Image (cartoon, grey):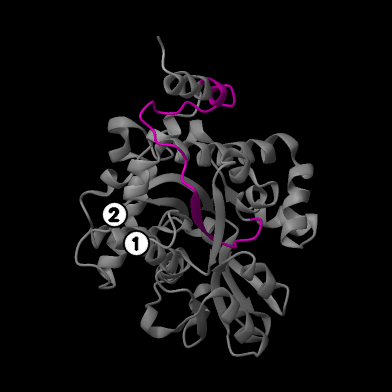
Amino acid sequence: MVSRRILIGTLTGLALAGWGVALPLAAEEDPAELSIGWVNVGAGSNQALMLTDKLVEKNLPNTNVKWVEFNGGSAGIAALNAGDIQIMTEVGLPPTVSSISKGLDFKIIWVNDIYLSSEGLVVRKSSNIQKIADLAGKKIATMVGTSSGYMLHAALASAGLDESKVEVINMDPPSMQAAWKRGELDAAYIWVPALLNMANDGGAILATNADFQDRASSIDMILVNGDFAKKYPGTLTKFLKAQNDSIHDLRDNGDAAMQRMADFLKITLDHAKTEYGGIQLMDAKEQLSEQGLGSGPGIANSRITKAIGAAGEYLVGVGSIDSVPTNIHEHIDTSFIEALAK
């Protein structure tokens, strides 16, 4: 006789499979509470759509889902390591590889977005900065230790300009926007919406990440606490189903999905389109490709693994870490994506 517990578990698995999720048989029930860290990058991601449509909450009806906002990935990783949150989204390459070098226990389970024209260098029109070399002696704000700081380094290097020749000021996006309004900055390298806000306030975008792709990449990822990943694999698959569904909604329904995201962010549809148009998103199938996280033995040589390593070389060069970790691929776990129905 089949036990009631096994029968219920089987029926639950079949029901979820019908929605594109196949849960591991050994998975525990979903947690009572789940705290997810996020960074408000405006429409430069699909996260706002997930929030306004409550996609994670719909996939985890018996879990109290809490979204915790951070100004950057480094603070989010600290909270993840402390156990204050279980998942952190929108974490860039530098803080990720730095955390790997410290031996922190986490897994990379999804690529949030790849930033092209939605992250870049905004200059004050009155500062007479016409090219990268003109930044010499100027005050430039960025968020050190994030993708923006990394890309600023690439931008300066493209013009043969050493960072010692400019005054780099470490600020989070809200602080730099306030300093910009006070006229204290000549330029800033940052992501949207701060990038566009300063450009619309007496500035001009001089260059974006797309101009420096031969030197560096700006890629945001989702990290999950190692213990949580082991205990709740089914929960993470449901979480990634929400990610995947929101990306397909944006691709399939265009303006309708974008309008809901714009309404949540309290910006116009045109503004949302501009921010969204400067990024690349990958659905589940693309995540598992060589251009994404890869899968199986391919993870070690995937685009993302190589990009994390390149960011590590940059951090070694500036003295932030001693050496590039050799175990980067071991921190990437695609099993939760693979559990999604193909």
Circle 1 residue: 81
Pointer 1: residues within 10 angstroms few (<14), some, or many (20+)?
A: some
The answer to the question of whether label 1 and label 2 lie on touching residues, with beta carbons closer than 8 A, is yes
In the image, 147 versus 48, the foreground residue is 48
Q: Which residue is mark 2?
A: 105
Residue at 41% x, 65% y is 79
Rendered location of residue 50, percent (x, y): 63, 48
Element assignment for label 2: loop
Q: Can you tell which mark lies on residue 311? A: none
Q: For the point 55% across and 36% down, which residue is it?
A: 241
Please name whichever residue, 232 or 176, is drawn nearer the observer in this view of the structure: 232
Q: Could you say where residue 333 lies in the image, as x and y percent from the top left?
A: 35, 40
Which segment did they paint magenta? 14-43
Q: Does 120 sit left or right of 264 as displayed? A: left
> What amino acid is at disc 2?
Asp
- Main secondary structure of the magenta stretch: loop
Q: Is residue 290 visible?
A: no
Is residue 327 at least partly visible in the picture? Answer: yes
First in sequence: mark 1 or mark 2? 1
Residue 30 part of the magenta-drawn span? yes
Where residue 217 sits: x, y (%)?
44, 55
Instruction: Report the side of 93 relative to 192 (left or right).
Output: left
Q: Quadrant of residue 26?
A: top left
Residue type, numbered disc 1: Asn
